[in-house]
């Protein structure tokens, strides 16, 4: 049945997205750790990248869970690398 095959492909895509995002996350963590280890302070550039990545993942999750109708990158602009949470 072709529907069973579709489930297999969907599962593979989900695993690929999860594995790719975890790889990027660990690379960010690794480079920030090295920077702190060497300079004893965090890198603002790496922090900016990590905020952009976090905002991108939130954008994807919001779209997938129907909290937002805005399609994630590459169908819209990449989210800014700034903290978007309200300071209330």
Image (spheres, grey):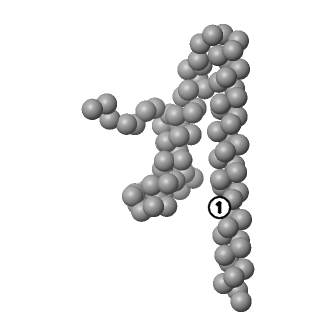
Describe the element under mark 1 as helix, strand or loop.
helix
Q: Residues within 10 Å of mark 1 (few under 14, many from 20)?
A: few
Foreground pick, 55 / 38: 38
Q: Which residue is mark 1?
A: 14
Residue appearing at x 69%, y 26% in the figure:
31
- Vertical order, 72 against 85 (above or below): below
Foreground pick, 65 / 73: 65
Q: How many marks?
A: 1
- Vertical order, 73 against 45 (above or below): below
Q: Residue 38 at what x, y percent from top left?
A: 70, 12
- Vertical order, 32 against 19 (above or below): above
Query: Is 16 left or right of 68, judged from the image as shown?
Result: right
Q: Residue 21 at what x, y percent from top left?
A: 65, 47
**Which of the 4 image quadrants contains residue 65?**
bottom left
Residue appearing at x 67%, y 67% in the figure:
11
Quarter of the figure that contains the C terminus: top left
Residue appearing at x 40%, y 57% in the figure:
68
**Which of the 4 image quadrants contains residue 28?**
top right
Residue appearing at x 49%, y 61% in the figure:
64
Q: Residue 84 at what x, y percent from top left?
A: 40, 37
Q: Residue 45 at what x, y percent from top left?
A: 58, 23
Q: Residue furthest bottom?
A: 1
Query: Is 35 left or right of 47, judged from the image as shown?
Result: right
Quarter of the figure that contains the N terminus: bottom right
Q: Residue furthest top?
A: 39
């Amino acid at each position: 049945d072709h529907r069973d095959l579709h489930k297999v492909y969907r599962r593979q895509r989900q695993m690929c997205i999860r594995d790719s995002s975890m790889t990027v996350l660990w690379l960010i963590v690794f480079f920030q750790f090295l920077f702190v280890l060497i300079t004893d302070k965090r890198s603002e550039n790496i922090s900016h990248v990590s905020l952009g990545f976090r905002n991108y993942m939130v954008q994807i999750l919001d779209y997938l869970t129907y909290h937002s109708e805005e399609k994630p990158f590459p169908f819209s602009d990449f989210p800014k690398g700034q903290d978007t949470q309200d300071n209330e």
